[in-house]
Amino acid sequence: MPIRVTAEPTFRDVLAGSDRAQIGMWVCSGSPLVAEICAGSGLDWLLIDTEHSPNGLESTLSQLQAVHGYPIVPLVRAPTGERVILKQLLDLGAQNLLIPMIDTADQARDMVAAVRYPPHGVRGVGSALARASRWNRIDDYLAHANETIALFVQIETTDAVANVSEIASVDGVDGLFIGPSDLAASMGLLGQQDHPDVVASALRCIRTVAALGKPVGVNAFAPATAERYLAAGASFVLVGADVAILARASEKLAATFIGRTDLAGPEVPRLSY
């Protein structure tokens, strides 16, 4: 007899069962090795990005396999809400999806339909061939697939901010995630995600969504900004990224040992050897 397996708890389940905010980081390198290192960090969740990172289906699959078994929850950010792409990500075993650039409740409802099988949605049926069902080793996968998937949508424009209550109220949307960088660009403040107006819009969204009883997350690399969002009711926050950590740490080495003060590290005199 084949081994019978069960699906992992979703991020929806983790958020509902936690008495504190969940702290995570981006995994953008495309490397399963880096993803596994980050999975053992002690953080709560990882966001494997396929929108702005060199990730395709194969590398996303490898990273999901690399982090499996560690006490951390992986989310996968899709490059777009296109149905075929979402179907492929689901079939390779991504249980938690984040869909970028959702501006309206109708778009959010389309995403709910895309991740659910008929008659509740339009997801294509190929589970017997897919890691999602562990090749039919998860008992009665088709009947319970909706329970194994969590859907999060991203608020990144002024239109989305205006419609945030309606988006948060869509049945089947398990949480919202605010992207301050694109929101800043939408507000005419490109590159100024910590601008007071951007922060104020993000805070308004956090308070609105939290009051509706839905989990709400946000990206915030600046510790003071992250703390502000957490205090406002954010239930999950990204506070770093693998590639950014490597970039800043390597620059600090250059500043410390070579005196490269043109890099983003402390100004340290060049060492003598």
Image (cartoon, grey):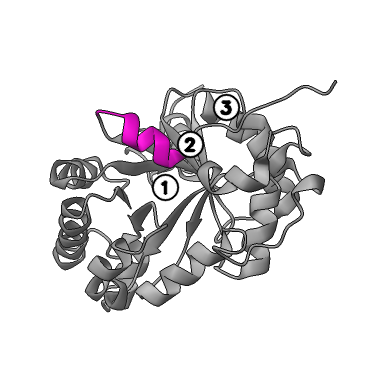
In this picture, is 211 found above or below 201? above
Q: Which circle, 3 or 2, is nearer the viewer?
A: 3
Between discs 3 and 2, the one toward the N terminus: 3
Q: Tell me which secondary structure the magenta stretch mostly adopts.
A: helix
Which residue is the site of mark 2?
254
On whether residue 167 falls in the magenta region, the answer is: no
Give the residue drawn at x 47%, y 32%.
253
Image coords of residue 173 (percent x, y): 40, 57
> Residue type at mark 3?
Ile
On whether residue 18 falls in the magenta region, the answer is: yes
In the rendered image, which quarter is residue 51 located in? bottom right
Residue closer to the observer: 246 or 4: 4
> Residue type at mark 1?
Leu
Residue closer to the observer: 161 or 213: 213
Disc 1, SS: loop
Left or right placement of residue 270 versus residue 121 in this view: left
Which residue is the site of mark 3?
37
Q: Which circle, 1 or 3, is nearer the viewer?
A: 3
Which residue is the site of mark 1?
263
